[in-house]
Structure formats: C-alpha cells, structure tokens
C-alpha cells in the first residue's frame, strides 16, 4: 500500500496549489487564443483533484467508523467471555 490516505491528500493539496499558481499565471501572463481554454482546463483538473481529496476524507471516515465498531464488538465479546453481562 505504501502511502497513507493523509499523505495522498497532502500530495494532492500540493499539486492543487501548484496548478492554481500555473493557471493564474497562464490567465494573466499569456494573452491570446487558447490562454483562457488552457487555464479553464487546468481549473477543471484542480476541481477533480479537490473532489479526490473529499473522497479520501470519506474513506478515512468510513475506516474510522469500521474500527470503532470493531472495538465495540471486541469489547462485547470480551465481556461475554469473562462472564459479565451487558446492559
């Protein structure tokens, strides 16, 4: 697996920041045919990267919830094995 979700999000955020800088430069430094389209395409890609970050956030939340539920199951099992009743 290698990188954690947080590391991927951080890398994506760095890419987004760089692309935003490039898109801004293209929009202001280059005048003429294609500059607006190029800047617009970069902005579309930036939005896709930001959507990916949100998706990774969702995955992290799902994993946290799964871990919490697993801990609860383990605690209940331990209580049953130790002869304690659950309320």
Image (cartoon, rainbow, N blue to C red):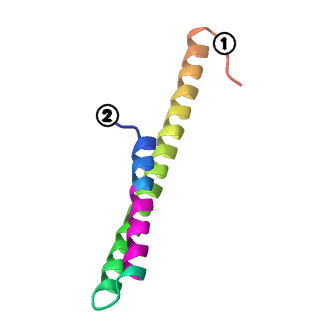
Q: Residue furthest top?
A: 82
Please provide the residue range marked out in magenta.
Answer: 15-27
Q: Are marks 1 and 2 in contact (CB under 8 Å)?
A: no
SS under mark 2: loop
**Image position, residue 83 (x, y; %):** 62, 9
Report the label total. 2
| Residue 43 appearing in the image | no
Q: Is residue 1 above or below residue 28?
A: above
Q: Is residue 62 left or right of residue 25?
A: right
Residue annotated with mark 2: 2
Q: What residue is shown at x 48% (from left), y 44% (from top)?
A: 60
Q: Earlier in the sequence, mark 1 or mark 2?
A: 2
Residue 82 quadrant: top right
**Image position, residue 63 (x, y; %):** 47, 40
Q: Residue furthest left?
A: 33
What is the quadrant of the N terminus in the image?
A: top left
What is the quadrant of the C terminus in the image?
A: top right
Q: What residue is shown at x 34% (from left), y 83% (from top)?
A: 30
Q: Residues within 10 Å of mark 1 (few under 14, many from 20)?
A: few
Q: What residue is shown at x 43% (from left), y 54% (from top)?
A: 14
Magenta span dominant secondary structure: helix
SS under mark 1: loop
Q: Nearer the viewer, mark 1 or mark 2?
A: 2
Q: Work out whether residue 15 or residue 48 is closer to the camera in this orientation and state it.
A: 15
**Image position, residue 4 (x, y; %):** 40, 38
Q: Work out whether residue 7 or residue 79 is closer to the camera in this orientation and state it.
A: 7
**Image position, residue 76 (x, y; %):** 59, 22
Tag of residue 84: 1
């Amino acid at each position: 697996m290698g990188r954690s979700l947080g590391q991927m999000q951080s890398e994506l955020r760095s890419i987004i920041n760089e692309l935003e800088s490039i898109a801004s430069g293209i929009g202001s430094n280059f005048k003429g045919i294609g500059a607006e389209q190029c800047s617009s395409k970069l902005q579309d890609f930036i939005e896709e990267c930001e959507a990916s970050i949100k998706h990774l956030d969702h995955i992290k939340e799902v994993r946290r919830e799964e871990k919490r539920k697993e801990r609860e199951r383990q605690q209940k099992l331990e209580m049953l094995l130790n002869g304690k009743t659950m309320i």
